Amino acid sequence: MLFHVRMDVHLPHDLPADSRAEIVAREKAYSQRLQHAGKWPQLWRIVGEYSNYSIFDVDSTDELHEILSGLPLFGYMTIKVTPLATHPSKI
């Protein structure tokens, strides 16, 4: 199952620099493990924003929820999920 996911990150401005660096490093490692596993095949930065568009390829909505809620930055994100279906004109 493919899903298009927009993630907007809202880190507190008063978050200490060392805490910010640590959570961002954990987020990067977590996302790269999922990319290597094929669960997160596309990851695109949105220019000028602390946001991304991603494509997830998972077996179920429950798996997607588990992945997203496991993100170290999950508590600081607004997430919008759109399920995708094959377009009949796709070649």
Image: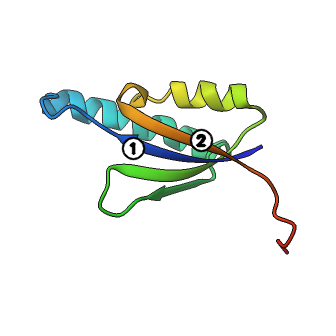
Residue 55 image position (x, y, % from top left):
62, 51
Q: Position of residue 47 (x, y in %)?
A: 35, 64
Location of mark 2 (residue): 81
Quadrant in which the N terminus appears:
top right
* Point 41% across, 28% down: residue: 72
Residue to which mark 1 is pinned = 8
Residue type (three-letter) at the residue carrying disc 2: Val
Locate the C terminus by quadrant. bottom right
Residue 10 placement, left or right of 14: right
Residue at 66% across / 42% down in the picture? 37
Separation of residues labelled 2 and 1 (CA atoms): 12 Å
Residue 89 appears left or right of 77 = right
Q: In the displayed structure, does residue 74 sit left or right of residue 24?
A: right
Q: Nearer the viewer, residue 80 or 29?
A: 80
Query: Percent position (x, y) of residue 74?
Result: 43, 29
Q: Is residue 62 above or below residue 6?
A: above
